[in-house]
């Protein structure tokens, strides 16, 4: 089996749990969302009962992007970021993301998908490097975000590009 084949695990079915048993925190006894559910809870990833209990509402994601972003989120939840992806990155980058980081990443991906959709792009595979650069400019100029906020959103897009089959130049 090649490395690429190993990376491309079988696609999850609608009844596949969104969080693999090994990722569920010890002592969690609540429900685990299924891949086909319209809302995914991230509670099973969080051992802190006082932390925000995030839920991903897929109905808020543009329909044309929903299947791709669900798969990217599923991979982010269940698979470690590959070492090759983390090479030459800041030491604070982790192979596994927290429930809060996953939730914030999905919000960023949703905003990016909405921005792309307004420009006639309806799939991550149709997204170009120029789209990515344009969105970065939009974050700085159009939304007036701080440098730190823009950086966090661009990192989320970089993680997305590392987990999706998108143009090789996207986010690099």
Image (cartoon, rainbow, N blue to C red):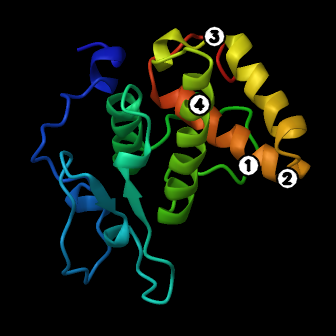
Instruction: Name, please, the residue furthest toward the left.
Output: 15
Mark 1 or 4, nearer chain start:
4
Q: Nearer the viewer, mark 3 or mark 4?
A: 3
- Image position of 42 with respect to 120: above or below: below
Pointer 3 residue = 128
- Disc 1 versus disc 2: distance between alpha carbons? 6 Å
Pointer 2 residue = 148
Badge 1 vs badge 4, beta-carbon distance below 8 Å? no
- Image position of 106 with respect to 24: above or below: above
- Disc 3 versus disc 4: distance between alpha carbons? 20 Å
Badge 3 vs badge 4, beta-carbon distance below 8 Å? no
Question: Is residue 25 toward the left or the right of residue 97 in the image?
Answer: left
Does residue 172 show up?
Answer: no
Mark 4 or 2, nearer chain start:
4
Which residue is at 29% across, 23% downward?
Answer: 8
Which residue is at 49% across, 53% downward?
Answer: 96
Question: Is residue 159 toward the left or the right of residue 57 in the image?
Answer: right
Pointer 1 residue = 152
Q: Nearer the viewer, mark 4 or mark 2?
A: 2
- Image position of 128 with respect to 149: above or below: above
Which quadrant holds the C terminus?
top right
Q: Secondary structure at mark 4?
A: helix
Badge 4 vs badge 2, beta-carbon distance below 8 Å? no
- Residue 52 tag number: none
- Disc 3 versus disc 1: distance between alpha carbons? 20 Å
Pointer 4 residue = 85
Which residue is at 38% across, 25% downward?
Answer: 64
Mark 3 or 4, nearer chain start:
4
Q: Mark 4 packing: few (<14 Cα in 10 Å), some, or many (20+)?
A: few
Mark 3 or 2, nearer chain start:
3
């Amino acid at each position: 089996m090649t490395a690429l084949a190993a990376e491309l695990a079988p696609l999850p079915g609608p009844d596949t749990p969104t969080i693999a048993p090994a990722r569920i925190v010890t002592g969690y006894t609540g429900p685990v969302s299924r891949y086909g559910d319209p809302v995914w809870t991230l509670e099973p990833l969080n051992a802190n009962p006082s932390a925000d209990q995030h839920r991903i509402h897929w109905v808020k994601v543009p329909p044309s992007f929903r299947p791709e972003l669900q798969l990217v989120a599923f991979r982010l939840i269940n698979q470690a970021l590959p070492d090759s992806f983390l090479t030459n990155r800041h030491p604070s980058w982790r192979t596994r993301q927290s429930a809060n980081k996953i939730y914030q990443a999905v919000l960023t991906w949703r905003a990016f998908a909405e921005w792309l959709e307004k420009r006639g792009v309806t799939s991550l595979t149709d997204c170009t490097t120029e789209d990515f650069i344009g969105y970065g400019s939009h974050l700085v100029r159009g939304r007036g975000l701080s440098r730190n906020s823009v950086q966090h959103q661009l990192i989320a897009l970089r993680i997305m590009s590392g987990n999706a089959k998108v143009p090789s130049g996207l986010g690099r």
